[in-house]
Image (cartoon, rainbow, N blue to C red):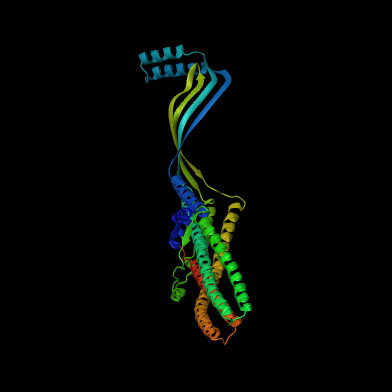
Amino acid sequence: MCMVTFGASAQMLTIDQCRDMALQHNKDKQSAQLTTHQAQLTVESTKALFLPDFSFVGFGLYDTAKGSMSYGLTGLKQGLTQAVMGGVQTGVLTPQLGQWMGQVGAAMPDQLGIDYKVGFVYSGSLVMKQPLYMGGKIRTGLEMSKMGVKMAEQNERMTDAEVIQSVNEAYANCVKAKELQTVAERYKVLLQELEKNVQSAIRHGLKIKNDETKVQVKLNEVELQIRRAENAQRLAIMNLCHITGQPLTSQLTVSSEYPVVDDASTLATADVMQRPEYALLDYKAQMAAQQVKMAKADMLPQVALLAKYGYSHGVKLNDEHLLDGLDFAAGVTVSVPIYHFGERQNKVKIAKAKQLQAEVERDNKAELMQLEIARAANNLDEARLEVELSERSLSQAEENMRLSRQQYDAGVEPLSDYLESQAMWQKAYQTKVDAHFQLYLSSVAYMKACGRLVE
């Protein structure tokens, strides 16, 4: 029952399935996605700066200040009386109108008094501020935020490439461990067959006991090799579970062959500009150029429209409120920088220096990436040659072992030479497995160096 359960829980995975699982569960990938989301929200936040800004402003004050003011009106009354009399005499005013104006002047008090009291003053207003011209600062900020999104996307590409490279290496290790276990088991079968033949020859007096001991020593060695191969395969599976986000106790099985490696003709399509690392450096240089515009914007005028609508209450004059009702106000604010002792000019120079530094860094890293591509191409070419030589060596080792077996059976070759030919065959087989393993990893490294591991 345990064996049936074990077999039922095992899952055969392809390399594409492992990549998808790793990209879904990898923590670095999730962090990169959150960074991209933050950059997208920054773009939306920057766009909002083009629109009006509404806010509510409230004000409250209590002040005990109060007092009174008086103004003398005697001179005004005398001047009015003389003017009326002169107007009547000259005919400018009719006698009836002059009489009425005289009565009005006589009714005026000699003193005019004003009593005031501050008391409790409060107001509440809805304020609107609309930027009209900020020296290009908002537009530049929008361009920078859009570049931030592109940089986050390239960083996500770079993270994907690292995850895919890790899962490819883990998958290849599983295949390699499985193949090495197969090599050890095939070598064990050869030794067991040889042991039976030697024991039969000893019973018939054709061989000595020492030959059986030599074979048993080799069997003991291969038993240890099988155990090591089993442990290596178990650890490789656990590592693959870890990278793909599965429990370490999951029963995963992989194919016995590596995925197909592209042709050598792909070497001619290498382009350093396809790499996300280069794109990040290029966007960094463009971002530095935008910083120069941002520094220049501080030297330009800034214009904004202001408007408010609200209610004000307070300040009594002769027991009547001076402020008591709704009011509206609008205006324009203009800020023109004049002179700051070279502070803003130096900021522009600093921004230009940083832009030049970013461009130099981009060009320098591009050359290093080109060298990395050339090195990866050489490694891939050498790995292909190593695979061809290892397959040729394995074929030669198999032929050598076959001839040695014939000579041993004919009694013209000692057992030690036959055992050595079997060991050479095993070593050649292991070399072939290592060569195919290295070829696959070299192809993955080359695709990553070219920026084609993730589209």
Q: Quadrant of the C terminus?
A: bottom left
Depicted 11 relative to depicted 129: above or below:
below
Q: Nearer the viewer, residue 76 or 327?
A: 327
Q: Is residue 224 visible?
A: yes
Return the residue nearer the eye: 423 or 303. 423
Q: From this viewpoint, which residue is outermost toward the right?
A: 210
Q: Residue furthest front?
A: 204
Q: Is residue 440 above or below residue 280?
A: below
Residue 373 in view in this figure: no
**Extreme residue in the bottom direction:** 412
Residue 267 position, x and y percent, is: 47, 74
Residue shown at the point (54%, 57%) measured from the top left: 238
| Rendering coords of residue 249 (x, y %) | 52, 53
**Count of numbered marks:** 0
Q: Position of residue 41 (x, y in %)?
A: 46, 48
Task: Give the camera-side residue of 398 and 216.
Answer: 216
Percent x, y of residue 438: 53, 71
| Residue 37 against residue 405 in the figure, above or below | above
- Near-viewer residue (245 or 367): 245
Which of the 4 image quarters holds residue 93? Answer: top left
